[in-house]
Amino acid sequence: MVCIDNINDKLLVAESFLFHKLKILFSFAFVTLLTLSCGVGSSNPFKTSSDLEKDHSVLSSDLESGISIPLFVPAEEPLRAPSEVPEELLIIWEVWAHLTRDHVASSEFSPEEFAEAAINGMLAELDDPHTAYVRAARHEINSEDLQGKFEGIGAHVQSTRDGKIVIVSPIEGGPAEAAGIRAGDTILSVDGVLLEDKSLLDAITLIRGPRGTAVLLGILHLGDIDPVEISITRDEIPLESVLVRSNPGDEIAHIRVTDFFADTAEKLYLAINQVIDAGSEGLIIDVRDNPGGLLRSSVDVVSLFVEDGLILSEIDGSGNKREWIARDDIPAFDIPLVVLANEYSASASEILVGSVQDTKRGKVVGDTTFGKGSVSILRPLSNGAGLYITVAHWYTPAGRLIHGEGLDPDIEVSGITDRRELESEQTNMAIQILQQELKSSQR
């Protein structure tokens, strides 16, 4: 242990420290100068080509005692990039070319992994969780969904802003619901693989699998402290998006819309006609825990209730605006309406909520919605993979941008810890509103 007990000792130590720093700075400045000289065509200042052949083991130059500087070695042959490489991506190709030519472990490189790492690196700079690379296997899953069924646990999942993978809602009657998975649960791991650094699409790929196989999920239930492990046997999951929750002849019909698929509007149209024919005079459309779906489907669904006018507008990165108008070829129902929504009502669900509010078509009961006000497309790639791209943000008929904010309900019913009790209170409030409206119309 060295003790400094007078001013002179302090100055000597300071001068020694400063001199050491100056040596390091001088060494780096010297290397920078020599490197820049090499970059404009001068000969290698450390070794000639013949010197390198004689002593290939020398990989550093000792400019100062204890300071080792990496040897600058220009390529023996200049790199010639293929003509199709864009100028702005030339540096990426150069790095790849140097690595495959010179790296000690180049024989173990996986071009596919390097390509995906480069892609994910670019996407990470966007800070946009809805723009993502989709591996070929996941792209295949998307194609499976378009058939109206898939094989998995039967649950909708969403990535939160802090990167957690959360259950938006288990599909009714599916394996996840039967195993005790609930909306708001956080998935921590899949078959022992932690999801901390996994994207939403990676998580879905791990969770899904062939019918009859088991998957072990690490789950943290909403409100719990300790996680649990839940084993679920995968099954074939039909994608039913319209469910009638009320009994035939009930004064107030209750229809749940779980997703916005291509056929959702048609199925909802049939369901509404069914409950009206059975005697219902008021209607609850329940989009709680509905993660969204197709934009066109949401426009078709809103057109069942809004006779004409603007449903939403979308604006892309160049400022181009596109307006979506209610379809005049779909007959709109004039039945009194209440929409149930909560914090897991997202995307297309929010298009319905925003349209109903802004057009004064009905009331919205529940909690503030999720806040996904972006429009995405899926571009296919040459390797069988795909690329989700956020191409625009959408606005409600009144011009409200809801991205990251969500939509507040007209009547808030929240703050109840027990989920079933909360949902029951929200539904009862919707029924009361409709009953009062029906009584008022009869006076």
Image: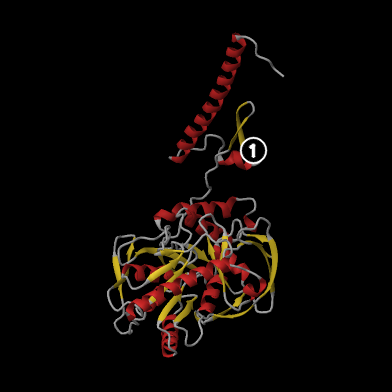
Image coordinates of residue 162 in percent, x first then y, are 53, 54
The answer to whether any part of residue 342 appears in the image is yes
Q: Mark 1 Cα within 10 Å, few/some/many (few <14, many 20+)?
A: few
Q: Classify 109 as above or below 46.
A: below
Image coordinates of residue 336 in percent, x first then y, are 37, 78
In the rendered image, the quadrant that contains the N terminus is: top right
Q: Classify 269 as above or below 19.
A: below
The answer to whether any part of residue 299 appears in the image is no
Residue 185 left/right relative to 241: right
Q: Residue at x 59, y 69 (%)?
A: 205
Tell me how the rendering is colored. Answer: secondary structure
Query: Of 109 and 217, which appears nearest the observer?
Result: 217
Q: Classify 417 as above or below 428.
A: above
Instruction: Name the amino acid, label 1.
Output: Val
Residue holding disc 1: 58
**Residue extending furthest front?**
443
Image coordinates of residue 143 in percent, x first then y, are 51, 77
Q: Residue at x 46, y 53 (%)?
A: 125
